[in-house]
Image (tube, helix red, strand yellow):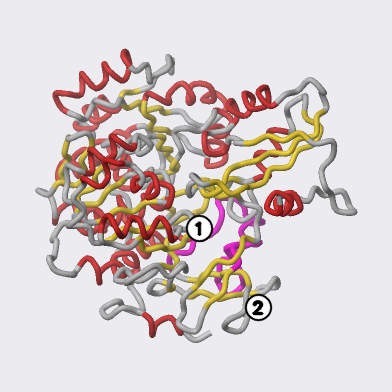
Amino acid sequence: MDKIWLKSYPPGVPADIDPDQYGSLVQLLEESFRKYAANNAFVCMDKFMTYGELDAMSKRLAAWLQSRGLQKGARVAVMMPNVLQYPVALAAILRAGYTVVNVNPLYTPRELEHQLKDSGSEAIIVLENFAHTVQQVLGKTPVRHVVVASMGELLGAKGLLVNFVVRSVKKMVPEFSIPHMVRFRDALIQGRRMPFTAPQIAASDVAFLQYTGGTTGVSKGATLTHRNVIANVLQSEAWLNPSMSQPPVVDFPTIVCALPLYHIFALTACALLGMRVGALNILIPNPRDIPGFIRELAKYKVNMLPAVNTLYNALVNHPDFRHVDFSSLKVANGGGMAVQKAVNDKWHALTGTNIIEGYGLSETAPVATCNRSDTAGFTGTIGLPVPSTEIAIVDDDGRALPLGSIGEIAIRGPQVMSGYWNRPDETAKVMTADGYFRSGDIGIMDDNGYVKIVDRKKDMILVSGFNVYPNELEEVIMAHPGVLECAVVGVPDEHSGEAVKVFVVRKDPALDAEQLMDYCKQEFTGYKKPKYIEFRDELPKTNVGKILRRALREEKQAA
């Protein structure tokens, strides 16, 4: 297909970017550390960190990690919310020549164990609030080095008070005991006296393992190279330039980082893009505290706010939101899940900007398409392919379909992963011979190059922008002694877009919904937990006995 989308590009956005202008992501970051040394890079709970401080701290932590004997390419897990230690750890791991394995801090022991074992992580940097989870699985994983951070340790004088409140008043740190663990601050102090050796890093080296269910539901690491991530940072920068360069020009933008940094959207759109342009990132550790989040927003002249539809919806429906000054806001990016027109319209009425919806996946680092940042209204599409990106609509055999046909969205570009970590079989299922990644989403492209998602090929459930895979949930629920059969589907939900519903055939007639819900709470992180449980005498099946999730979904919609 000709690149018909290029005719719809805004003036000044190039057809292509050059991902090879940097030899590694480290080169890009260190350029920013030098260029913007005096600028504030991150702020959390009113404590600012400059690019110079980030440079120094990350180099010390990198030296400490190297002193542990970890070899180049070793995987180091990071299990923290949005706190100042996150960017320090991120830069340190990359600068030391290692691979970042981002971990959701709310994972259950079962989920954490799988990710640490699958990635082969040898070290983990964890906030103490979640160290008890690490303790439970440590002996079953390759992890040999544990660094434990505290909420207050980088917050200056008030850090002692913050730690006291978090530990003793709010009781947010369950007891844990991890032999030979090292405190984050101690690692920084020790690292100051240690030599740092800058490794030779190639663009093809692995920068991140971003865990995802992909299109099949088996949790696996999308292998993102330094070149993949550089490409997406430069693509995002070029794409947003028409809005960011509008007068009054802001030399160093202020970005709200409310999405969790372990999620690929925030990692690229907030942290890495922010560091590329010398921005200040406002770290929000708990965006679910909407009143607290709004109080933080009110302190700054915000220029860019990436979020998911559910977060935008929560903000515009809170009475305090209308008192925030958004006169400096240039871009509100929407991703992770579909942006609803009603939410966009309310957001526009209150802030004067539209939500710019984009589309991407962990496998594409993540941005593949996006609406123009200077768009005048809500398009109901996921926009145009970003620079250096090709979108094809393909049939079940991977053949490109004519323009205007409905088929699977396939993506080719420098941001597309090199494959799934140690899973060539799974990689083969999603990569075509000519380099396209098959997304599993069904869409259509119009004659201006805009892409619209019409359905999902996979049974994936999208809860507030997070992927939930029925296979994983069903396997765990089936392990309950009272369950004979089960099927997991997504149902529409006003707050989260979709919610998880499980249909169960009982083995034990005494099993009730409360017992099963308690079991699920132990096994699944919050967004994966079923919201609804319905017991049935039998489940619909194909003639070969496969449970028909689609029939259950359609039945609920019809009802």
Which amino acid lies under the numbered mark 2 shown in the image of this protein? Arg
Q: Which region is colored magenta?
A: 414-442
Name the residue at 52% across, 70% down: 452
- Relative to 371, is 161 above or below? above
- For label 1, the crowd category at 10 Å Cα-Cα, with few meaning under 14, some 14 to 19 and many 20 or more, is many
Quarter of image, res 13: bottom left
4 and 39: which is toward the camera? 4
> Which is more N-terminal, label 1 or label 2?
1
Q: Is residue 323 left or right of residue 214?
A: left
Q: Position of residue 498 (x, y in %)?
A: 56, 48
Q: Is residue 439 magenta?
A: yes
Image point (71%, 37%), residue name? 475
- For image coordinates 27% across by 55% down, the residue present is 350
Position of residue 309 in the picture relative to residue 42 (left or right): right
Disc 2 secondary structure class: loop
Residue wearing tag 2: 399
The answer, for residue 211, to whether it is visible in the render is no
Q: Which residue is mark 1?
A: 363
Q: Callout 2: 10 Å neighbours few (<14), some, many (20+)?
A: few
Say how many tags the image has: 2
Q: State whether residue 339 appears in this view.
A: yes
Residue 369 location, x and y as percent? 44, 68
Disc 1 is placed on an element classified as helix
Say if 17 sits above or below 105 in the image: below
Res. 133 mark: none
